Image (cartoon, rainbow, N blue to C red):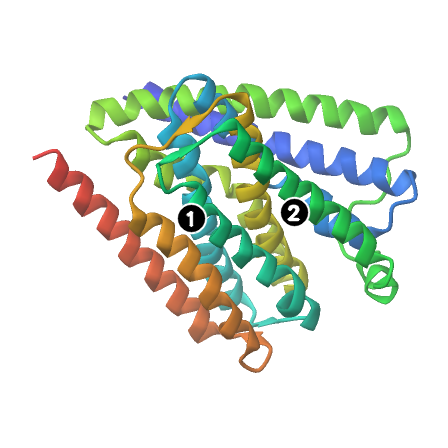
C-alpha cells in the first residue's frame, strides 16, 4: 500500500508541475502574440489550472471508469468553492468585482443548471458532450470580446504576478507547453491507476475516490494559485481563478471527455450534484453582501465541506458493511 500512496503522490506532483509549465508557456506565448493580460487571466490561467481535471477525466474514461471522471469534476467544483474559497477568505477577506457578480458567476450557475438535465440518466453522450464543448467555446469567445472593454483592469493585471512575463525566447514557450502536456499525461496515468488500486484495497467505490482524493488532488493548482493570490492581497485573481475553473470543468472537461467516449456515472449521488449546484448558487449572495467574502463566510464554506466529507465517508463505510 505504501508504494501505491507514493506513486499516487508522485502523480499529483507531476500534475501540478505540468499545469505550471503549461500556464507559464501559454501565458508567455499569448503575451508575445499581443493578447491582453485580462483575457489571459480569465482563460489561460483559469483553464490551465484545470488541465489536471481534464487529463485525469480523459484517462478515466479511456479506462472505462466513468464515475471517476464525473466525480472528479463534481468533487473539484465542490472543493474549489468550499475549501479553496474558504481558505483564501480566511487568509484575506475577498473583495469582489462587480463584473464577476454580473457576468462570470451567473455563467457558472448556468453551467451547473445545464448539467442537471444532461446527467438525469447518469450518462453523458457524445451529442451532449458536443453541446458542453460548444459552451466553453462560447464562453472563451465571449471573454475575448468583453475583455476589449476592460482595458483598465487589463492594465492592472499586467503587474499581477499571476500572469508571468514573456520568456526570453519563443522556443522556451513551446518547450514549456510540450513538457507541461507530457507531465500532465504521465501524472494523470499514475493518479488514476494507483487511485483505483487503492480504492479496491480499502473497499471504497470509484465514485467516492473521484469525489475526494482525485478531486482534491487535481485541484492543487487552483489551491496554490488562489492561496498565493490571497496572501498577496490579490482577491480578484483568487476568486476569478475558481469561477473560471468551475466553468471550464463542466463545459470543457466533461464535454471533451464524453467526446472521447460516452461517460457512465453510476455511483454518483444526486446529493453530490445538488451540493455542487447549491454552492455555486450560494456563492452569489455571499459575494453580493458588502461585495466581499468575509472570514466568517470562508469558515462557513469550510464547515460545509467538512460535513460533506463526513457524509461520504459514513456512506462508503455503511455500503461496505
- SS for dot 1: helix
Screen quadrant of the C terminus: top left
Left or right of residue 130, residue 137 in this image: right
Q: Nearer the viewer, residue 179 or 129?
A: 129
- Examine the rendering and report whether any part of residue 209 can be seen: yes
The image quarter in which residue 95 lies = bottom right
Residue on which the image places disc 2 = 46
> Callout 2: 10 Å neighbours few (<14), some, many (20+)?
many
Left or right of residue 218, residue 176 in this image: right
Residue drawn at (45%, 23%) of the image? 61
The image quarter in which residue 300 lies = bottom left
Instruction: Decide: is 206 above or below 178.
Output: below
From the top left corner, tell me how far across and down residue 45 is, in percent. 69, 45
Instruction: Decide: is 188 above or below 306.
Output: above
Residue drawn at (36%, 33%) of the image? 265
Q: Nearer the viewer, mark 2 or mark 1?
A: 1
Tag of residue 116: 1
- Examine the rendering and report whether any part of residue 234 can be seen: no
- Distance between the Cα atoms at labels 2 and 1? 23 Å
Amino acid at each position: 500500500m505504501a508504494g501505491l500512496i507514493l506513486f499516487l503522490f508522485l502523480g499529483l506532483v507531476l500534475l501540478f508541475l505540468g499545469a505550471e509549465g503549461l500556464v507559464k508557456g501559454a501565458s508567455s506565448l499569448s503575451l508575445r502574440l499581443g493578447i491582453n493580460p485580462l483575457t489571459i487571466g480569465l482563460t489561460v490561467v483559469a483553464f490551465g489550472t484545470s488541465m489536471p481535471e481534464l487529463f485525469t477525466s480523459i484517462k478515466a474514461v479511456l479506462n472505462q471508469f466513468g464515475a471517476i471522471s464525473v466525480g472528479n469534476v463534481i468533487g473539484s467544483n465542490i472543493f474549489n468553492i468550499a475549501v479553496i474559497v474558504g481558505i483564501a477568505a480566511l487568509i484575506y477577506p475577498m473583495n469582489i468585482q462587480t463584473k464577476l457578480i454580473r457576468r462570470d458567476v451567473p455563467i457558472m450557475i448556468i453551467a451547473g443548471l445545464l448539467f442537471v438535465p444532461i446527467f438525469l440518466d447518469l450518462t453523458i453522450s457524445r451529442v451532449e458532450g458536443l453541446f458542453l464543448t460548444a459552451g466553453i467555446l462560447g464562453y472563451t469567445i465571449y471573454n475575448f470580446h468583453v475583455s476589449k472593454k476592460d482595458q483598465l483592469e487589463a492594465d492592472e493585471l499586467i503587474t499581477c504576478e499571476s500572469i508571468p512575463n514573456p520568456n526570453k525566447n519563443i522556443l522556451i514557450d513551446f518547450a514549456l507547453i510540450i513538457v507541461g502536456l507530457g507531465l500532465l499525461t504521465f501524472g494523470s496515468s499514475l493518479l488514476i491507476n494507483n487511485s483505483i488500486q487503492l480504492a479496491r484495497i480499502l473497499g471504497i467505490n470509484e465514485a467516492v475516490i473521484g469525489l475526494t482524493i482525485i478531486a482534491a488532488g487535481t485541484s492543487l493548482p487552483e489551491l496554490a494559485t488562489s492561496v498565493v493570490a490571497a496572501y498577496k492581497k490579490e482577491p480578484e485573481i483568487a476568486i476569478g481563478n475558481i469561477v473560471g475553473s468551475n466553468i471550464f470543468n463542466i463545459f470543457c472537461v466533461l464535454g471533451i471527455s464524453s467526446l472521447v467516449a460516452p461517460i457512465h456515472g453510476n455511483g454518483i449521488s444526486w446529493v453530490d450534484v445538488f451540493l455542487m449546484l447549491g454552492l455555486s448558487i450560494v456563492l452569489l449572495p455571499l459575494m453580493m453582501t458588502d461585495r466581499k467574502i468575509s472570514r466568517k463566510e470562508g469558515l462557513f464554506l469550510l464547515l460545509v465541506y467538512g460535513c460533506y466529507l463526513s457524509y461520504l465517508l459514513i456512506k462508503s463505510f455503511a455500503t461496505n458493511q
